[in-house]
Amino acid sequence: VQLQASGGGLVQPGGSLRLSCVATGSTSDIEAIGWGPQALGKEREGVSCIRISEDITTYADSVKGRFTISRDNAKNTVFLQMDSVEPEDTAVYYCAADLAYTLTSAINPGRYDYWGRGTLVTVSS
């Protein structure tokens, strides 16, 4: 499984950005895709996850109501719509594939099996 995130850039506080994650390879093995930003000097955290087969979504409290995760199975692509962004959202955003989904730990970055290259999101005026 290979993953490639894109769509990052510079955005002003309160603005919006949409990230994309394209999966290739053995995509039929993927049960869920998540997003895990890592800010400079901090550990990677999980903020959102979507179960591919049932469209079940999970969000961290820090992004709930502001970020929306969605999927396009025909294109093996998962999106992260980021609205009302804050300077604290600044990070490199990585997407990851989970081959054994569990709801209770869906956004735990430690459970993901494959990580792609990230895309930098900078929130600044």
Image (spheres, helix red, strand yellow):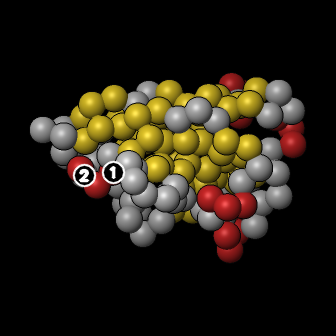
**Residue 120 position within the rendered picture, expressed as x and y whole percent measured from the top left:** 41, 34
- Residue type highlighted by circle 1: Asp
- Residue type highlighted by circle 2: Glu
Position of 61 with respect to 44 (left or right) is left
Q: Residue at x 18, y 40 (%)?
A: 124
Position of 99 with respect to 122 (left or right) is right
Location of the N terminus by quadrant is: top right
Judging by the rendered image, the residue that carries numbered circle 2 is: 86
Give above or below for 74 relative to 116: above
Do we see residue 14 in this rendering?
yes
Q: Residues within 10 Å of mark 2 (few under 14, many from 20)?
A: some
Judging by the rendered image, the residue that carries numbered circle 1 is: 89
Q: Which secondary structure, mark 2?
A: loop
Q: Nearer the viewer, residue 124 or 40?
A: 40
**Residue 94 position within the rendered picture, expressed as x and y whole percent measured from the top left:** 55, 42
Location of the C terminus by quadrant is: top left
**Residue 81 position within the rendered picture, expressed as x and y whole percent measured from the top left:** 42, 42
**Residue 58 position within the rendered picture, expressed as x and y whole percent measured from the top left:** 57, 62
User: Residue 8 is drawn in which quadrant?
Assistant: top left
Q: Which secondary structure, mark 1?
A: helix
Q: Residue at x 64, y 35 (%)?
A: 116
Do we see residue 77 in this rendering?
no
**Pointer 1 with pointer 2, Cβ within 8 A:** yes
Q: Residue at x 75, y 67 (%)?
A: 102
Residue at mark 1 to residue at mark 2: CA–CA distance: 5 Å
Number of marks in the image? 2
